[in-house]
Amino acid sequence: MEGHSERVNSIEWSPDGNCVVSGSDDKTIKIWDVNSGVCIKTLKGHSDCIWSVLYSNDGKYIVSCSKDKTIKIWNANSGECIKTLKEHLDEVWSVTESPDSKYIVSSSEDKTIKIWDVNSVECIKTLKGHLNSVVSVAYSPDGKYVVSGSWDRTIKIWDANSGECIKTLKGHSYAVRSVAWSTDGKHIVSCSTDKTIKIWDANSGMCIQTLKGHSGWVRSIEWSPDGKHIVSSSEDKTIKIWDANSGICIKTLEGHSYAVRSVAFSPDGTKIISGSYDCTVKIWGAE
């Protein structure tokens, strides 16, 4: 799917799997119809690169964050910007929503993580502990914990209620680029500029597996809805599907002409969407 004039940094599926949202260096957010591949809406309002986008759990809203230091909440139907959140002191790299849809969590170049109340749109907690940019955040499936990945090479697990850091996971030799929880909440997966993917036991904090196969930085990572597979994207222009149990790469998807910045499984796990520095969004069969 073509339409962005610059690099695509983030993509995400709508909860019903009928649409995809993308964010780009061109400062726009686009909503795409999956079946036709047509861009049905372009959202404008950010003044700089968009680093991350997501659909709310009910599909009614889109949340985006940007190099312009802001987070924006959009009406997914009308494309109108409803709220702009401003408290980070530097560019905002990542946003995620709690499973109960009550909170949004953001991470920033300012080394902090912020938890926002969706109803009041106020920052209720600021989590500090990373020594460098925090580029990825994700909620645990039960909503009790937040995991973060940073350029300081560490992954931290936080108590979402108290804001306390309860574990720091160390093992990557370079910056952590993306983190995600398994669907059962028992494991965390991370990827790094060290070209590896690591699977961690969320309870003990131990690294139980290191996946190697990409020849470039690994930029994005996600578990399949059934928890059986992991998908990754890389600077090496490829997407890889891994068996989460054995750690074996079972498929390599090639087609992008530049680095693949973002990747995600469809809600039913049958498709994969990718966004690339080649300015395109692609849909792939996952099976």
Image: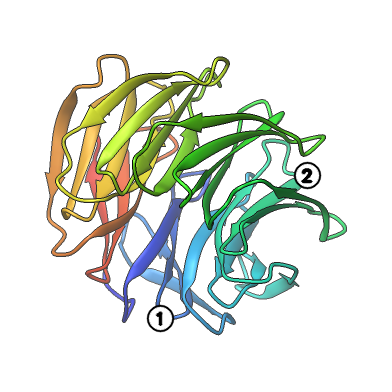
Display colour scheme: rainbow
Give the mark nearer the N terminus: 2 vs 1.
1
- Percent across and percent down for residue 143 are 69, 31
Secondary element at tag 2: loop
Q: Give me the residue at 27% from left, 71% from top.
A: 279
Judge from the rendering whether residue 64 lies leftward or rightward of residue 189; answer left or right.
right
In this view, the residue in front, 15 or 46, is: 46
**Mark 2 is on which residue type?**
Lys
Above or below residue 77? Residue 44 is below
Q: Give me the residue at 38% from left, 71% from top.
A: 39
**Mark 1 is on which residue type?**
Asp
In this view, the residue in front, 57 or 102, is: 102
- Percent across and percent down for residue 190 are 41, 36
Judge from the rendering whether residue 219 lies leftward or rightward of residue 54; answer left or right.
left
Q: Residue 256, which numbered label?
A: none
Q: Give me the residue at 32% from left, 72% from top.
A: 7
Q: Residue 102, which numbered label?
A: 2
- Percent across and percent down for residue 284 are 23, 46
Badge 1 crowding class, 10 Å Cα cut-off, few under 14, some 14 to 19, many 20 or more, is: some
Residue of label 1: 26
Badge 2 crowding class, 10 Å Cα cut-off, few under 14, some 14 to 19, many 20 or more, is: few
Q: Give the farthest residue toward the right.
A: 120
Q: Give the farthest residue toward the bottom.
A: 47
Secondary element at tag 1: loop
Q: Give yes or no for contact between labels 2 and 1 (Cβ–Cβ under 8 Å).
A: no
- Percent across and percent down for residue 287 are 22, 30
Tell me the distance, in whole angstroms, between the alpha carbons under discs 2 and 1. 30 Å
Above or below residue 250? Residue 88 is below
Q: Quadrant of residue 251?
A: top left
Q: Give me the residue at 17% from left, 55% from top.
A: 237
Judge from the rendering whether residue 39 lies leftward or rightward of residue 248; answer left or right.
right
